[in-house]
Image (cartoon, rainbow, N blue to C red):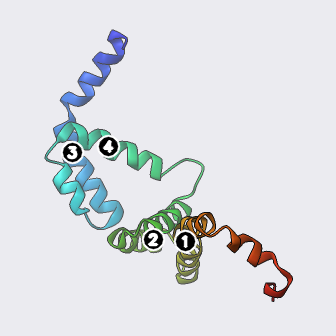
Amino acid sequence: MKPENQKTIDEFLSRADEMGDDIIAQTEEWLGVVPFIFTLMRERPEAFALSVLGDYHTARPASLDPKTAELVAIAAAAGAGADNCVRVHIGTALKEGATRDEILDTILIAGIIGKTRVLAPALRAFRDRLPEADSLSTSPKNRS
């Protein structure tokens, strides 16, 4: 790494503990709660500052308005099975102007895509293990 870049990183990391307090306060203002993972990660100030700041800037891209970003966060959290994250981001989406219907539709779309996570690998294994299953599904008597 170039010395000037290393110097910038070293200066940033030297202030990580101080930034951690600001990050916690800003997160509570933004989400209305401080996720428990943040309080534990905060014990490692450098990793915490780098991780959370990167996440924040990714979660709030210039190309999406805050409401849309929160709807995406709800869908991603639902797909990941992160129940507490779903709750937190529902609250933040409401704060950003999302309606009940927008949130419900977001969750339903996530659910449709989420079931693919179960069906696709299971049906591939089924097809691979029982090759005749492919031919059965395309036979005329099984099309109805």
Between marks 4 and 3 in the image, the one whose residue lies nearer the viewer:
4
Q: Residue at x 75, y 77 (%)?
A: 137
Q: Label 4 vs label 3: CA separation?
A: 11 Å
Q: Residue furthest top?
A: 3
Residue 20 numbered mark, or none: 3
Q: State yes or no: discs 1 and 3 in contact (Cβ < 8 Å).
A: no
Question: Is residue 1 rendered to the left or right of residue 117?
Answer: left
Q: Earlier in the sequence, mark 4 or mark 3?
A: 3
Q: Label 3 vs label 2: CA separation?
A: 28 Å
Q: State yes or no: discs 1 and 2 in contact (Cβ < 8 Å).
A: yes
Which residue in the structure is indicated by mark 4?
A: 51
Looking at the picture, tell me which residue is in the foreground, 98 or 131: 131
Pinpoint residue 42: horizontal percent, then vertical percent.
18, 48
Residue type, numbered disc 2: Ala
Pinpoint residue 144: horizontal percent, then vertical percent.
81, 89
Between marks 4 and 1 in the image, the one whose residue lies nearer the viewer:
1
Q: Earlier in the sequence, mark 3 or mark 2?
A: 3
Q: Earlier in the sequence, mark 1 or mark 2?
A: 2
Looking at the picture, tell me which residue is in the foreground, 100 or 124: 124
Quarter occupied by the N terminus: top left
Q: Earlier in the sequence, mark 1 or mark 3?
A: 3
Which residue in the structure is indicated by mark 2?
A: 78
Which residue in the structure is indicated by mark 1?
A: 110
Residue type, numbered disc 1: Ala
Judging from the image, what secondary structure is the residue with disc 3 in?
A: helix
Q: Quadrant of residue 26?
A: bottom left
Residue type, numbered disc 4: Ser
Question: Is residue 41 rendered to the left or right of residue 60?
Answer: left
Residue type, numbered disc 3: Gly
Q: Label 2 vs label 4: CA separation?
A: 21 Å
